[in-house]
Image: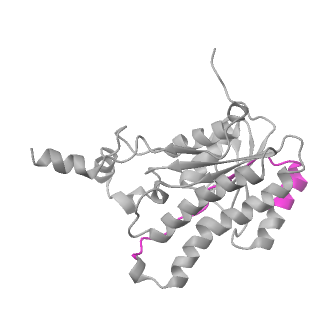
Amino acid sequence: MVAVIDLTGRVTVVTGGTRGVGAGIARAFLEAGADVVTCARRPPEEPVEAAGRTARFLPADLRDAEAVDAFFARVRGEYGRLDTLVNNAGGTPFRLLGEGGAGRHARVVELNLLAPLTASLAAYEVMRGQRVGGSILMIGSVSGTRPSPGTAAYGAAKAGLDHLARSMAVEWAPRVRVNTVVPGMVRTELSHLHYGDEDGIAAVGRTVPLGRLAAPADVGDACVFLASDRASYISGASLHVHGGGERPAFLDAASANR
């Protein structure tokens, strides 16, 4: 018997769901049958579509608490429910700590930690009054699990996001489940900025135990599972979607000296 996750009739919000990993997550929920609303400051360059369906886009600045409250009030008013929030919006430029002032690093933390907190609080106000409750997913990063030179503030924010999710999972149980998806390196339309041309991307992929970078769909599938009834007893968890992680550098060093 084939196990199929069907989210027909459910409503999912994906922040930053207009490109990259966020678009992959939105497509996965569309394929599962959910109604999907994406938000960002700017509209997508092209519609996010899958399975003959299209995600709806509504503009929102996640760093503006009033705008976030208005966004979720609109979703509740127009759809009558909110089943899943995926806090995906985030990111950072490469900047060593000594090359940026405290204000620049604070903005990275604001986008990657405080904005998801703001969105989660607004979503909780909707979900807590529903008979079926809801599910909130944080999109973390392996940067929050290891040293991240050049993206230290981002890594610190992602580590904090995972801890925040664990605390939410306790405070908001049993009405709302909260989990974190922790992606490793993901191949998106911007991968060339980080890894170079196709040869560079392939070389980086070979450092992953499973031999490739993740696709946005890999992250999306993990999110759909955690949002579904098949994960009804999973809360406060961190699901690593990183292809086995990173090969320890000491192994290569040891091999080179044999």
Q: Quadrant of residue 217?
A: top right
Is residue 153 inside the magenta stretch? Answer: no
Q: Image quadrant for the C terminus?
A: top left
- Residue nearest the observer in this picture, 236 or 29: 236
Part of the protein shown in magenta:
72-96
Quadrant containing the N terminus is top right
As for residue 82 lying within the magenta part, the answer is yes
Q: Position of residue 101 (x, y in %)?
A: 48, 85
Q: Residue at x 80, y 72 (%)?
A: 66
Rendered view: 61 above or below 230: below
Measuring 77% from the left and 61% from the top, which residue is drawn there? 121
Q: Taking 55 as reference, is 25 left or right?
A: left
Q: Residue furthest top?
A: 1
As drawn, 198 above or below 164: above
Q: Is residue 225 left or right of residue 77?
A: left
Q: Is residue 194 visible?
A: yes
Q: Is residue 112 above or below residue 103?
A: above
Residue 199: x %, y % from top left: 28, 50
Q: Of residues 112 and 213, which is closer to you in this image?
A: 112
Coloration mode: one colour
Residue 212, x across and y down, in percent: 37, 42
Where is residue 150 shown, x and y percent of the image?
39, 70
